[in-house]
Amino acid sequence: MNNVQRIEPRSGVAFGLRKGEILRVIDPLGGQVSDMLAFAEVDTRECLSNGRTFDYEETIRLTTGNRLWSNRSNPMLEIVEDSSGSHDFLLTPCSEATFRHFYPDKPVHRGCFGNLAEALAPFGIAADAIPVAFNIFMNVPVDAEGNLRVLPPATQAGDFIRMRALDDLVIGLTACSAYDSCGGSFKPIDYAVEAGR
Amino acid sequence: MNNVQRIEPRSGVAFGLRKGEILRVIDPLGGQVSDMLAFAEVDTRECLSNGRTFDYEETIRLTTGNRLWSNRSNPMLEIVEDSSGSHDFLLTPCSEATFRHFYPDKPVHRGCFGNLAEALAPFGIAADAIPVAFNIFMNVPVDAEGNLRVLPPATQAGDFIRMRALDDLVIGLTACSAYDSCGGSFKPIDYAVEAGR
């Protein structure tokens, strides 16, 4: 792979992705989560919506062939390849508040939420406008009663997902900062943008 | 019950709810859904978040004792009584786009989304700011593979839910307009605001 960029542990980035380009997100060491957001570049009030995605895809388990939809009912990204098959679209990015709630004895970190807010600010996107992220590689089983757990990701080193942009997008992407979602380790995430065909 | 208000079939309302007051939402005939939104009155950029709620309540099945949380990690409403125990917080309000997608042979309706957008506009809340609603009485089973279905509500006439406001709120509330969520019928929804104690 050319052009692979590294997101250092507990940090985040934002960048433009052109319609037709493919975003590859890689777990280089295994066992790490990457929170992804997407906004329409032409009007960033249009953004990923877990609810619209669950509506149209009729599943909460998204993998190859599924599309991620916006709050305006437009498909934003299509998953074209997925070596892990395990992602979450239920939970919000970790934040100072979630650190205080879930890890009261550990240092507070601004988390993926704070990292995304800083990375997206230059694009005019406010923290309050950050929706539920598509949490790549995150392992959140839901039992028959609806109870959920956050388990360490099942990914192996090199697992990846590839998603085709269906519009010109602003992408936010992190290497997750929380203890539970990455099994207590803090690891990097790699990504690359492949030309569309 | 005094002060019971009726939401006519396929319509919606918005109103203020003071901290401590209890909102009772009633299915007067049985088999109907009511989409509910909540915004902080002091700053309507703070709104209900299904993701933050799933984070803190650790379940997607919300009933008595559960709280509904905001995008700023504040609890907005607490469910204090619930005769049905069946609600959905995964799916977005029905809209013109969802009517075209799911009911291509039927007349398009603006749906709960359009009804909420009109009702909330006087409060300065834009359509793009409408998040996933808490879909009272909606029956959305999720199977072990994550696939979801929209079934007719299991409610009987008179079933209700009571929720205590934990902040001064702007509430949006509908009698659902979609075919699937209410079993093909369009019925009213009743509601009442009870004084806090």
Image (spheres, coloured by chain):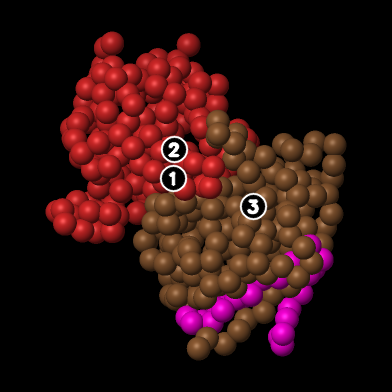
Chain colours: A red, B brown
- Secondary structure of the residue carrying tag 2 is loop
Q: Is residue A22 left or right of residue B158?
A: left
Look at the image and tell me in which quarter the N terminus of chain B lies: bottom right
For residue B181, the mark is: none
In percent of the image, x 59 and y 36: which residue is there? B143
Residue A95 % position (x, y): 28, 52
Chain designation of label 2: A
Camera-nearest residue between B70 and A184: A184
The answer to whether B167 is drawn above or below residue A109 in the figure is below
Question: Is residue B102 visible in the rendered structure shown here?
Answer: yes
Indicate the amino acid at tag 2.
Answer: Pro
Q: Is residue B188 left or right of residue A40?
A: right
- Secondary structure of the residue carrying tag 3 is loop
- Magenta residue span: B1-30
The verdict on a common chain for dots 2 and 3 is: no
Instruction: Tell me the CA gap for discs 2 and 1.
Output: 6 Å
Q: Which residue is mark 1?
A: A148
Asked whether disc 2 touches disc 1, contact meaning CB atoms under 8 Å apart, the reply is yes
Residue B51 % position (x, y): 44, 50
Q: Is residue A139 left or right of residue A107?
A: right
Residue A70 % position (x, y): 54, 40
* 1 or 3: mark nearer the eye: 1
Indicate the amino acid at tag 1.
Answer: Leu
Chain designation of label 1: A
Indicate the amino acid at tag 3.
Answer: Pro
Q: Which residue is mark 2?
A: A141
In percent of the image, x 73 and y 81: which residue is there? B4
Q: Which residue is mark 3?
A: B93
- Secondary structure of the residue carrying tag 1 is loop
Near mark 1 (Cα within 10 A), the count class, few <14, some 14-19 or many ≥20, is: many
In percent of the image, x 42 and y 57: which residue is there? B57
